[in-house]
Amino acid sequence: MVTIRLSRGGSKRHPFYQIVVADVRAKRDGRYIERLGFFNPIARGGEVTLRVDRTRAKYWIDCGAQPTDRVKQLLKQAARDEAATAVAAA
């Protein structure tokens, strides 16, 4: 089975997560199939907190990949941010 989950990077007390598509048997920070984006929970100033390729995420979900609970929340947040940006640009 394939899952969409977070892979941790960064240093101690400064996490940085990659949003990846991986086989459930792979280690958390190990081998993955495709990288979909990133999540930086401690972004400050002008740094980007979340970036996700939503079209590829939708493709993988349609193919049967199961996102984790946290990734589901992040995908919803990315959709809200994209909608807010579209409204602000109009």
Image (cartoon, rainbow, N blue to C red):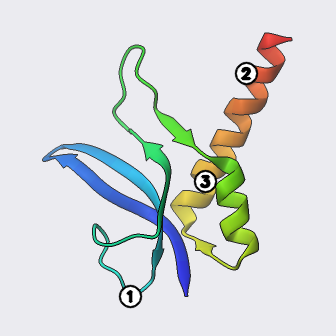
Quarter of the image for the C terminus: give it: top right
Q: Amino acid at mark 2?
A: Thr
Labels 2 & 1 near each other (Cβ < 8 A): no
Image-quadrant location for residue 1 = bottom right
Query: Which residue bears the numbered disc 3?
Result: 73
Instruction: Identify which residue, 51 or 72, lies in the foreground.
Output: 51
As helix, strand or loop, the secondary structure at mark 2 comes to helix
Q: Is residue 69 above or below residue 76?
A: below
Q: Amino acid at mark 1?
A: Arg
Circle nearer the N terminus (1, 3)? 1
Query: Which residue bears the numbered disc 2?
Result: 85
Taking the image as shown, residue 60 lies to the left or right of residue 86, namely left
Q: Is residue 9 above or below residue 1?
A: above
Q: What residue lies at 72% left-to-right and 41% top-to-bottom? A: 79
Q: Residues within 10 Å of mark 1 (few under 14, many from 20)?
A: few
Give the CA separation, mark 2 to mark 1.
37 Å
Residue closest to the far right: 90
Q: What residue lies at 38% left-to-right and 38% top-to-bottom? A: 40
Query: Which residue bears the numbered disc 1?
Result: 25
Mark 2 vs mark 1, foreground winner is: 1
